[in-house]
Amino acid sequence: MMTYPLEVDQLTVAYQKKPVLRSVSFQIPSGKLIGVLGPNGAGKSTLLKAVLGLIPKVEGEVKIFGQPYREQRKSVGYVPQRESVDWDFPTNALDVVMMGRYGHLGWFRRPGAKERELAMECLTKVGMADYAGRQISQLSGGQQQRVFLARALAQNAKLYFMDEPFAGVDATTEKAIIQLLHELKEQGKTVLVVHHDLSTVQEYFDHVMLLNGELVASGPTSDIFTPGYLQKTYGGRIAMLQDFAAVPAGKV
Amino acid sequence: MADFWIILTGTLVAATCGVLGCFLVLRKMAMVGDAISHSVLPGIAIAFLVSSSRDSLLMLVGAAVLGLITVFLIQLLQQGGLQSDASIGIVFTALFAIGVILISRNAAHIDLDLDCVLFGEIAYVQWDTLIWNGYDLGPVAVWMLGGTLVLVLAVIGLFYKQFKLCAFDPALAAAVGIPVALFHYLLMGMVSLSTVASFESVGAILVVGMLIVPASTAYLLTDRLSVMLLYSVLIGAVSSAGGYYAAKWLDASIAGAMITVAGILFVLAFVFSPLHGLMARYQKRRKLKTASA
């Protein structure tokens, strides 16, 4: 039997008593760019956090490359939402990227020259090498997002989770992120991206998951990104959605 | 010799609190430090009642336990849906009140003065010396604070990257397998320890000043965490020495003068810091204006 990068079985997550995700089950294919879509409050970020063990699950099972997450931490890279951290923290871009190596260093080893070099390489890949020594609050939103991506690259993972990396970034950053996603894919890595902008879905993703508290559908973009499924996911707000799904793939 | 011991004691308090304070400030938990410093009171009182002596070690343990209970209760209330500032207010006043009752009820039996607990008396530190084999080894407070400082530096030094990542991005820390809760309670335990170790000299109220003021001043002066830690300790040390001489000159409370000096240093940094000060910001804005004009 082949193992999937991520396999979720009957996952239920609740905040206080209110369920946010109800019995979500799916597998994701290897080496694909996967978009996780759904309206606000659909549980997209919650899904990522539950998979990473950041919030407790009520029930269900999560397997990463066939094993519990604990055993596979080093195969996973994580890009949290940009607003989740305080950018006034006294540190610079290079230092933030080096944090991506902390998990690999174990309990006592300190980051050294090797980590610095790798972090610099990752910053270069996202076009931020010139800003390595810049205090992070002095970076624009898009630059901050690229620093976060560089940090995930430094984790050198096989499976990446990205929580809204395109939110509030400039066009340059958006292009840089897309290029990076394709590079990761070419290296055979799998990337799961929580995404908001429906107009770019067909252009960016091979595979989509539609989420609305429950899993509405999951599969190749051409099969799943259809008016029918979108209506099921977004309910009444379909009028404007029609336009997105009506445009044939490749023309955007 | 008196000058030396008092300034050394103040500096040890400042160094211990300065290091921990940086992490409290960065984690936006300054008020939790305040809460801990008050709610360790029942721990101290219980330790007195149990041992009916001023055994410092027992007091440290009692207070550390209460400090951790405080943090735990605050989190419990928050998870129950209460706002975080209200949770802090409820927990620390309730525990502090219990401490006041314990001390006032037993005041006749134990040699523990509420004023001393609240405001400390650093001038008396030199009289309570540690005698070992007939040798006078210097004030007990200096040994206790020195020990706490060594412990704090060792723990922070050993786990610097964990404390840093937990402060900056706890989600990533948890995702890469750092036990975030463990380091949270470790930090809070150390804050409790240093509060108790400091309370005899500066008191439960002013120790908050030592935790927060030098760290906040350092925050305004640098963009590097390691430098911030160093500045925080230096500013604390300057505050203790400066405060001691100011108090001598004014013939006033030493601990009060130390925190006042720290406060003055903070105001100076707030206005004149080349990085984040008011002046620097004003100049930057003016430059932008002239550039766009």
Image (cartoon, coloured by chain):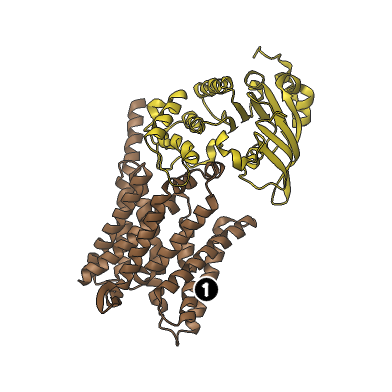
Chain colours: A yellow, B brown
> In this picture, is A9 found above or below A168?
below
Indicate the quadrant containing the C terminus of chain B: top left, top right, bottom left or bottom right.
top left
The chain letter under disc 1 is B
> In this picture, is B102 found above or below A134?
below
Residue B175: give x, y in percent of width and height.
Answer: 56, 42
Q: For the view shown, which residue lies furthest in the front direction?
A: A1
Does A177 sit left or right of B284 as displayed?
Answer: right
Secondary structure, mark 1, is helix
> In this picture, is A13 found above or below A229?
below
Residue B32: give x, y in percent of width and height.
Answer: 49, 59
- Residue beneath disc 1: B97
Does A212 sit left or right of B72 as displayed?
Answer: right
Looking at the picture, which amino acid does disc 1 mark? Ala
> Residue visible at 36% across and 41% down?
B223
Viewer-nearest residue: B2 or A161: A161
> Residue visible at 48% across and 42% down?
A86
Query: Is residue B259 visible in the rendered structure shown here?
Result: no
How many marks do you count on the picture? Answer: 1
Crowding around mark 1 (Cα neighbors within 10 Å: few <14, some 14 to 19, many 20+) is: some
Does B137 sit left or right of B278 as displayed?
Answer: left
Indicate the quadrant containing the N terminus of chain B: top left, top right, bottom left or bottom right.
bottom left
Q: For the view shown, which residue lies furthest in the bottom direction?
A: B108
Viewer-nearest residue: A194 or A56: A56
- The part of the image, by quadrant, that contains residue B122 is bottom left
- The part of the image, by quadrant, that contains residue B113 is bottom left
Query: Is residue A228 visible in the rendered structure shown here?
Result: yes
Residue A181: give x, y in percent of width and height.
Answer: 56, 23
> Residue visible at 40% across and 63% down?
B194
